[in-house]
Amino acid sequence: MKDNSSELFPIVDEEGNVIGRASRGECHGGSMLLHPVVHLHVFDREGRLYLQKRPLWKDIQPGRWDTAVGGHIDLGEDVLTALRREAREELGLEQFDPEPLARYVFQSTRERELVNSFRTVTDISPSPSDEVDEGRFWTLDEIRASLGSDIFTPNFADEFVRLFGE
């Protein structure tokens, strides 16, 4: 598998209003065009957080642990539709109640994303698809102990501290 560099993403302002469109290649190639994404933090009843390991074929942060569900919002798609699509595609999650956590701009050396972050609690064991190398539940203490060790994507590490504290 490989990411499609010609896939089109909406370009948005910091309020989420669509102001244009650009390819994945442009958005991930240092243009700093702001494009919207969704993140879903999946907790179990014991308070553990599910993380996915990104496949090595990904064009951004391959092989690192990341938010349970994360993906781009397609052209013409609203935030909740994208969130449900990504949860179904990546982890097979169909029935869940998303609780909004935050919307913020994340910037790396290669891209700028308008992140729409949610959380949910589930009794369902996620079933990772071929879009995910592996996944497992982590205690928050395990995550905190591993911050700064380069095993997480910078976006996840930043968002975890922002939302759940160090």
Image (cartoon, rainbow, N blue to C red):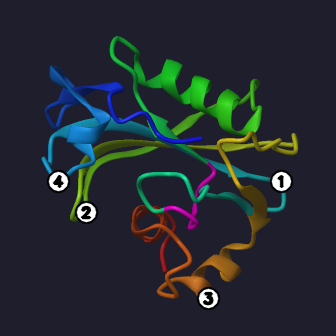
Q: Which residues are magenta?
A: 62-68
| Element under disc 1 | loop
Task: Answer with left or right where residue 123 lies relative to residue 106.
Answer: right
Q: CA distance from mark 1 to mark 3?
A: 21 Å
Q: Nearer the viewer, mark 4 or mark 2?
A: 4
Q: What secondary structure is marked by label 2?
A: loop
Q: Which residue is mark 4?
A: 30
Q: Most extreme residue toward the top, as rendered?
A: 76
Up/down of 157 relative to 115, above or below: below
Q: Amino acid at mark 1?
A: Arg
The quarter of the picture where the N terminus appears is: top right
**Tag 2 residue:** 108
Residue 145 bears which disc, if any? 3
Q: How many marks?
A: 4
Q: Position of residue 162 (x, y in %)?
A: 40, 66
Other-residue count near label 4 (Cα within 10 Å), few / some / many at <14 / 14–19 / ≥20: few
The Cα atoms of the two marked residues, 2 and 3, are separated by 23 Å
Dot 2 or dot 3, earlier in sequence: 2
Label 1 or label 2, whichever lies nearer to me, is: 2
Which residue in the protein does label 1 denote? Answer: 45
> Which percent across, then down, holds residue 114?
28, 42
Measure the C-alpha gap from mark 4 to mark 2.
9 Å
Q: Residue at x 39, y 21 (%)?
A: 74
Q: Name the residue type under label 3.
A: Ala
Q: CA distance from mark 3 to mark 4?
A: 31 Å
> What residue is shown at x 50% (from left), y 51% (from top)?
58
Q: Nearer the viewer, mark 2 or mark 3?
A: 2
Q: Secondary structure at mark 4?
A: loop
Which residue is located at x 27 percent, y 40 percent?
25
N-term mark: 1 or 2: 1
